[in-house]
Image: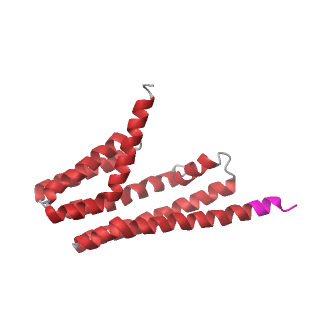
Amino acid sequence: MTPARPTRLRRSRAWLAGALTLLYPAVIYLGLQYSTPRIMALALVVLAALRAGVAGQPGWRLLAMAACVLAVIVGMTGSAMPLKLYPALVNATMLALFAWSLWRPPTIVERIARLQDPALPPEGVAYTRRVTMAWCVFFVLNGALAMLTAALGDDRVWAVYNGGIAYLLMGAMFAGEWLVRRRVMARHAGAQRRPG
């Protein structure tokens, strides 16, 4: 009974960190309407502490430390700009993790695919590598747009893109990949059934 509790607590923290990451643009946008950037930097510190508490990969620990640095800069300057850099930082971390897995296989997408099919064929491994590359391109573009919206200085544009449009684009990427994967699997299954 004792070993289950830390696992459950860790899972709860991971879900909370994920939810706060998703809600971060809305929380910062609303918070800046009624409070100062220095007070809102506490939200970033809480998020960093949660991330550090559940971080299994060095990239996530690095993200937590970078978030704390952003919060310190906000504390020193009183500027809201560092608060708005966090979504770009998340994209940079995801890019680093996915790109690292291309260099040091198996790729992240292959690891996820092997959860469903441990005996992933070579064609599947090649496909997951291409999907990992596509996600790297996505994180570059999405991160660049996150930086651009932060640089524009319009809080509403920043919040709408990073708290809404970016998630819709990510959902479209997931859905598109799922549709392509089904076609690739159907084509592969058809080729397997064909004689000779």
26 displayed left or right of 126: left
On screen, residue 27 above or below 8: below
Return the residue found at the far top: 2
| Near-viewer residue (98 or 186) | 186
- In the image, what residue occupies the spot 42% across and 25% down? 2
Asked whether the viewer can see residue 65, the reply is no
- Give residue 112's position: percent from left, percent from top: 55, 50
15 displayed left or right of 37: right
- Give residue 117's position: percent from left, percent from top: 65, 48
- In the image, what residue occupies the spot 22% across and 73% down? 154
Q: Does 62 appear in magenta?
A: no
| Near-viewer residue (7 or 117) | 7
- Give residue 84's position: percent from left, percent from top: 25, 63
Which residues fall within the magenta stretch?
189-196
On screen, residue 12 above or below 139: above
Q: Does 190 appear in magenta?
A: yes
**Snapshot quadrant of residue 21:** bottom left
**Snapshot quadrant of residue 192:** bottom right
Colour scheme shown: secondary structure
From the image, which quarter does the C terminus lie in?
A: bottom right
From the image, which quarter does the N terminus lie in?
A: top left
- In the image, what residue occupies the spot 55% across and 61% down? 131
- Give residue 126's position: percent from left, percent from top: 63, 58
Tell me which secondary structure the magenta stretch mostly adopts.
helix
Asked whether the viewer can see residue 171, the reply is yes
**Number of marks in the image?**
0
